[in-house]
Amino acid sequence: MQAVGKIRSINGPVIHVEDCRDFKMHDQVFAGELRLIGEVIGIEDDTAIVQVYEDTLGMKVGEEVVSAQRPMSVLLAPGIIGGIFDGIERPLKVIENQSGSFIDRGLQVDLLDKSKKWSVQILAKKGDSVSPGAIIAQTPETPGVMHKIMIPPGVFGTISEIAQSGDYTIDEVIAKVETEKGIVDIKLAQQWPIRIPRPHRGRVNVKRPLITGQRVIDTFFPLAKGGTAAIPGGFGTGKTMTQHQLAKWSDADIIVYIGCGERGNEMTQVLEEFTSLVDPKSGNSLMDRTVLIANTSNMPVAAREASIYTGITLAEYYRDMGYHVAMMADSTSRWAEALREISGRLEEMPAEEGFPAYLPSSLSAFYERAGYVKNNNETEGSITIIGAVSPQGGDFSEPVTQNTKRFVRAFFALDRQLAYRRHYPAINWLTSYSEYVGELSLWYEENIDERFMEYRARLLALLQEEAKLNEIVKLIGSDVLPDDQKLVLDIARVVRTGFLQQNAYHQTDTYVPLKKQFLMMDVIIYLYEKAKTVVAKNIPISQIAKTGIYEDVIAIKYNIDNDSIDKIEEYKQKIDNVLNEILASNEVVMR
Amino acid sequence: MNIEYLGLKSISGSLVVLDAIEDATFSEMVQIKTESGDVRDGKIIQLAKNYTVVQVFEGTQGLSKTNTSTRLLGRPMELGVSKEMLGRVFDGVGRPIDGLGRVFAEEYLDVNGKPMNPVSREYPRDYIQTGISSIDGLTTLIRGQKLPIFSGNGLPHNELAMQIAQQAKIKDADGGNFAIVFCAMGVPNDVASYFRRGFEESGVLERVVMFLNLANDPVGERIITPRCALTAAEYLAFRHDMHVLVILTDMTSYAEALREISSSQNEIPSRKGYPGYLYSDLASIYERAGMLKSAKGSVTQIPILTMPNDDITHPIPDLTGYITEGQIVLERSLYQTGIYPPVSILPSLSRLMKDGIGEGYTRDDHPDTANQLFASYSRVQEVRSLASVIGEDELSDTDKCYLEFGSAFEKEFISQGREENRDIEKTLNLGWEILKILPRKELSRIDTKILAKYYPVGSEG
Ligand SMILES: Nc1ncnc2c1ncn2[C@@H]1O[C@H](COP(=O)(O)OP(=O)(O)OP(=O)(O)O)[C@@H](O)[C@H]1O
Ligand SMILES: [Mg+2]
């Protein structure tokens, strides 16, 4: 039986299909003569509403729409990592082979390579009883990623047949499982609907940080593995740079990077850069742990809506294997706008700023798919979601920022004024926050230093004091402040320029290990304490600035390599020397 | 397809509704003949079993429900392209208006283009020397980049764009293989002739293709104009390996046209009445800049927009900034103090410059020098506001240096003659001269080796 309908009307990417009683909600369809891919997004009486993932140009009323009779799904199998796909998992390299440098419509492409043979090592044996998630085989997908072949969700039974270790394509049957409902063939490939979260056994509390090597994040606003974060900011404030930095340097096993309605050149850049960059931990190319989903701003808007779900489903699949996955979505605002555009075409009643009333529930359902979980196969895995938000006019009170804020637990607020001053990353230390500090404190204290969180709190307090003092300075200048308050301003400047500012383009500074982050704080606090003793003696504070010691401490980030961080300790000696000299010379004067 | 369909069901704004038309396809072009016999172009924007909605580019004025006939053209909006277009002037939908007859088309291309595949793009790295210090030094333009000018009414954005077009120079042998596509949307006639004259005077007219939709031309056509221009640009760049600079002015008029059409279709507006798809629509224009691995040419875009009320958070500059690869912002207060070009450095940015400057591209010190100039100039702003509170005399010596640096930077570095063409060497040297007003220890953004090379100890100014 085939479920076929006829196009009744066409309005941009939205088409109405009639005479299609067998269409089901969220089924994938092929629309029109070109068999454009679409999805059923509404059913009214005997009319189905379909969003089409390609340009509907040239389509006619009366053309056929055929249902695939299964929900809009992704194909899950080896061959994903290292690839670049569009919003519905079509490989862009294969599309290029078929249609050249510009993307044509109606291309029929395999989502994953069906001819490639993978070297599969079989782990299970005949007679094993298996349940969903059970790992029965594995194959090295890239030099860095061992791809686990799992029993798909819903399959319980006993292995009645199993292949030998050897080379297989993703469509070859490697095992048969006898279930209550009959024999199920197990291949390297399985499918999963993009809008339904893949099952797991349950959530586990977050307990480990996602280490990013970015000081302002790791130290001040740490992110947990399995956590959620938003990066809101006006244009040019550094959302994409921050996401790229996290994709490059964070200690996740797998990176899913979604370019959702953003620039084509940025995806090209990631592809080029990640292929040539080497992961310092594994020695492999960064692309060997990364999958890119690129639905750029000029690609069809409906596929932009789907790209987020495609990405998160891929992430869940690797989580199920026991991996820690970090997913970047740049930008969730473009996704929300895609929702708005489709909703407008459906003439739904808009809520705020034209966004549909279901924007908050869609956002929360998306972020809920993050988490640190116990998988069905007893492994633990996590998905961390980092979503960029592009508020109109840079105004954080707009609906997407506000609703996102309700569902994420870390908030890295990018500040246009900081960006103008070229203070990068332009994460505002007064308005950003992380709710993971409490849960992660223990980890930092046990693994880095027991004073870590105390130092963090002290530096944050210092920056807050600076902000208050700046209000006064704006009115009357800094000259009238007493020296102990001037010292706060000086040290706060050292924290801002020497610690918070981090140059993504600098070879050493682009990634900083946690231990170095701690030692840098340690030196700054040492400098502060020692300088206080100078101030206490009523020695003019300008004498400290003149020695250039502040600049020396600020330059630690450039001058101390990440593999010679024990040299940082020498700065304390230097501070002693410089400040003792001031103390001594002033004693002479006083005598 | 020569069947004519007589009569309209209804007319509203720029839209007409017809009965169902057999064989009509979505987005296809139609021709509408009015009572008096003149012919207008339109496009099908909605198709249903029992009606067809057509947007009429030249507007619906004078159309009647009964005596209007409609003919399907069986194709999307297309532009006939050929190398002969160079030196020619077209209206907003690609009809020649220079009296030189029609252009023999080598092929017909859908003006909407197709999205470039990200894997086929070549990441842009080669810089274009514009001879303007504030751009070359601080917001370097890269071949294949989209770098808009954010301006305001009465500011010299046209002069600046003209100066860039006249002085633009690319470094290698491709120098001779460049072209300019000029696209006017809703601009007054004298602006169009200003550009025409400028191209003429600098002797490049035969390398320019002009598409003009002037202020009194139909609003519906305005939506097509940039698409025609970019179709021509892509053709020259990717079929004929040319380096094409596209000047699009004024994007504000374009967006307003889009708003007008959207509201006549009763669409739900988002901010300030602009349609929710303004971002996607603008992206479908701006994303057509770039380079391809498979071709030698490039499409570089300089869109110009006038910020309503000088407000950078207005949806038009805002959504533009979210798509383009940086922006050059002009500032009224600088212009009022006699500075040309009045480029406001701090909000200006070129995102692609980092990969196209420095050793092997411009000069080894360029990244650091630019960085330092930005940082020091932002300090100037702080010092100035402090000075306005406590008085200049009360400032510390260092802060006084900053004031001096600030005014030299504006008067000597940013400001330059309308015909002054500075090469990159000159721009960077000038930057150093001005940086030397500051004590050496203030130059914390500059690598010690670079500092020693360009500002040796003891050479403090
Ligand atoms: N950590 C950093 N180090 C150095 N430069 C940075 C850093 N962060 C941002 N920048 C600078 O800011 C520019 C803009 O950053 P980015 O492209 O990430 O902005 P964005 O917030 O993604 O903007 P949009 O919303 O328009 O995409 C970069 O091109 C770079 O010059
Ligand atoms: Mg970005």
Image (cartoon, rainbow, N blue to C red):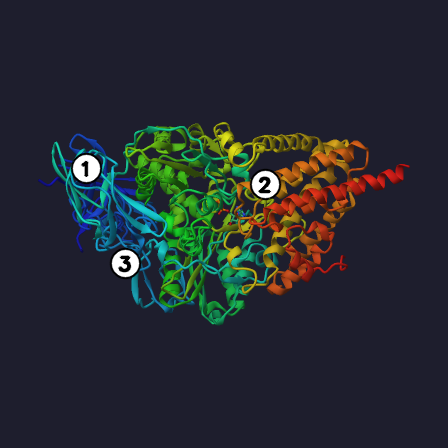
Instruction: Using the image, name the chain to which the residue with label 1 belongs.
Output: A
Q: Which residue is drawn at 54% across and 68% down?
A: B202
Left or right, B23 with reference to A539: left
**Type of amino acid under label 2:** Leu
Quarter the N terminus of chain B occupies: bottom left
Q: Residue furthest right?
A: A591
**Left or right: A386 as drawn, with respect to A185:** right
> Relative to residue A295, is residue A154 depicted above or below?
above
| Marker disc for residue A99 | 3
Viewer-proximal residue among A327 and A240: A327
Where in the figure is residue B101, as x and y percent of width and height? 35, 67
The kind of secondary structure element at disc 2 is helix
Instruction: Judge the density around disc 2: few (<14), some (14-19), many (≥20) Cα neighbours within 10 Å.
Output: many
Comparing labels 3 and 2, the label whose residue is closer to the camera: 2
Residue A422 pos. (x, y %): 59, 46
The answer to which image quadrant residue B62 occupies is top left
Residue B400 in view in this figure: yes
- How packed is label 3: few (under 14 Cα within 10 Å), some, or many (20 or more)? some
Residue for badge 1: A128
Q: Label 2, label 1: how many angstroms apart (C-alpha)?
A: 54 Å
Which structural element holds mark 3?
A: helix
Q: Which amino acid does label 3 sit on?
A: Ser
Q: Nearer the viewer, residue B74 or A201?
A: A201
Tell me the chain of label 3: A
| Mark 3 touches mark 2? (CB < 8 Å) | no
